[in-house]
Amino acid sequence: MGDALDFSGKLVLVTGGGKGVGRGISLRFLEQGAEVVICGRQAPESLPEHEGRSAHFTPCDVRDIEQLQGMLDDIVERFGRLDVLVNNAGGAPHADAATASPRFSESIIRLNLLAPLNLCQLANQVMQRQPEGGAIINICSVSAVRPSPGTAAYGAAKAGLLNLTRSLAVEWAPKVRVNAVTAGLILTEQAELHYGNADSVARVAAGIPLQRMATPEDIGDACLYLASPLSSYVSGADICVHGGGEKPAFLEAAGVN
């Protein structure tokens, strides 16, 4: 089992891997011996590292297809391979769907759906040429499978990413496995911007069956599994990492424990 999670000699690309969930994913792969490349529009204040080994940063706006192509070309030239792609970069600010501009909505869909699609295509071209193929993991959100008020375009884009995952898994088999991780509420360095102060975060956590919010490393653990030989017969799947989900609102309204 330990050998199955040994990523020594493997190259892993994590978009948005310098902070938040992406940093947790990057750290998990570094801990297991992988060479990790992270990308973003700006370099993080510090690179993810483990026991003296650091991730490699490359500047890239994932919404720009030419920058994506350049990044993949550089990775292949430098490392000669791409074993795992984790499409993590994404997100959206709060916006009222009734008044959000078409330009705003298009930008959210471009970041959360079209950018992963484009990068999946480029990664597949590399992985199909490799004898051992590769693995692609798309980081999705519970917003894809429940109402997402205030982030409607984001939820719709993530729902599209789930469907895309299943379609690509069929088209690109058997060389490339494509899976998704549907993440729940996550405690990152910016959690209080989304959930309020520490007391509010604690109340949110209390509403989750496992009584805590996820950590970025929890998402990283799921990615390790999906990228490893332990999941060699898993493709087109969606692993929900949400602590058991959220209680239906009607239970509280009805006073049901």
Image (cartoon, grey):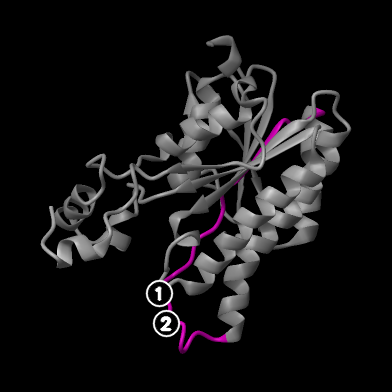
Segment tinted magenta in the rendering? 80-101
The residue pinned by badge 2 equals: 96
Q: Which residue is painted at 34% across and 49% down in the image?
A: 245
Q: Which residue is painted at 46% across and 38% down in the image?
A: 219
Q: Are marks 2 and 1 in contact (CB under 8 Å)?
A: yes
Q: CA distance from mark 2 to mark 1?
A: 5 Å
Q: Which residue is painted at 34% across and 54% down in the image?
A: 190
Q: Residue 37 sits in which quadrant?
A: top right
Q: Residue 227 sits in which quadrant?
A: top right
Residue 81, percent across and down?
Answer: 79, 30
Mark 2 belongs to which amino acid?
Asp
Mark 1 belongs to which amino acid?
Gly
Name the outermost residue toward the right: 129
Q: Residue 112 sits in which quadrant?
A: bottom right
Name the outermost residue toward the bottom: 99
Image quadrant occupied by the N terminus: top right
Q: For residue 131, say whether it is visible.
A: yes
SS at mark 1? loop
Q: Is residue 121 magenta?
A: no
From the viewer's perspective, tell me whether residue 32 is left or right of residue 201: right
Q: Mark 1: give few (<14), some (14-19) or many (20+) Cα within 10 Å.
A: some
